[in-house]
Amino acid sequence: MLKCVAIDDEPLALALLEDNISKVPYLQLVAKCSDTLEATKVLQENKIDLAFIDIQMPGLTGLEFIESLSQKPMFILITAYKQYALESYSLNVVDYLVKPVPLTRFIAACNKAYELYQLKNKAISPQAAPMHNDFFFLNADYSLVKVFFKDILWIEGLKDYIKVHLKQGNKPIITRMTLKEIEDQLPVSLFIRIHKSYIISIENITSIKKNNVFIQDVKLPVGETYRDNIQKLTGKKEN
């Protein structure tokens, strides 16, 4: 569970941020703050893992606030301004979200923070029990659906939507997200991009014939741009 704080001087934006946080099962909102002075007190009195913060704030800006801290939690910036992105990454923020933020984009940023949290805890406590890193959450049917990587057969991109085809059930999960966005969340050891419209589970490949990959009885094409991926996987060049 990530303990987090929301920092924004706009009441409506803060309320929306609180609502988004409530939809992510592994986030626990410790406090809401309308300025950086209030946020400083919260960070001093609580162990905070992740902070969501606006840039344009009364007193210190969000960037100045991050820079002023000696002990920093992870930060995700949420702002109406695009021009501070480059400066923000010099402060090692986890992500930079531009308002209005779609829920799928918000969840992707949270997933990134969660993965960093897991890696950090493994590095500090190598003897500790392994963290859960074999699943992620997708926004579908007005809820967050927990999906295990091992259950995915292939993922199909349809413009701004994707279909996640699973081992169990005939109905794929459909969510508003690009194939590139979900590709960034998938372990490279388990999945491979074979086409501009397809990502497949390496474990569930049945066979490869010419420029097609078979997942069970489904034939999926290999795009010319991605043929090197298949060659690297198999160690063989198709004739």
Image (tube, rainbow, N blue to C red):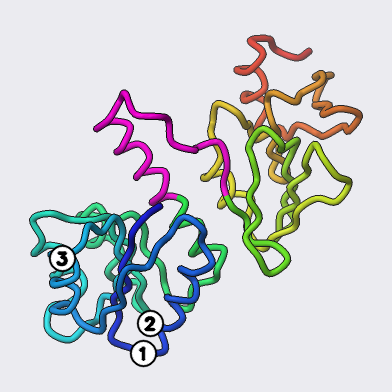
Nearest the eye: 34 or 202? 34
Q: Visible in this render: residue 151?
A: yes
Image height of 48 relative to 237, above or below = below
Label 1 element class: helix
Q: Residue furthest bottom?
A: 11
Q: Quadrant of residue 23?
A: bottom right
Upstream in sequence: badge 3 or badge 2: 2
Measured Cα–Cα span from mark 1 to mark 3: 23 Å
- Checking the image for residue 45, the label placed there is 3
Q: Residue at x 19, y 74 (%)?
A: 39
- Residue found 21% across the figure and 72% down from its top: 62
Residue depicted at x 41% and y 67%: 97
Q: Is residue 11 left or right of residue 147?
A: left
**Residue stretch rendered in magenta on the structure:** 112-136
Q: Callout 1, which amino acid?
A: Pro
The residue where tag 1 is placed is 11
Q: Is residue 117 magenta?
A: yes
Disc 3 crowd rating (10 Å Cα; few below 14, some 14-19, many 20+) is few
> Residue 160: in sight, yes or no?
no
Disc 1 + disc 2, Cβ < 8 Å:
yes
Give the camera-side residue of 28 and 205: 28
What is the spatial separation of the Cα atoms under label 1 and label 2, in whole angstroms?
5 Å
Residue at screen point 29% across, 71% down: 53
Residue 192 on image: x %, y %: 63, 31
Q: Is residue 27 left or right of residue 24?
A: left
Indicate whether 99 appears above or below 197.
below
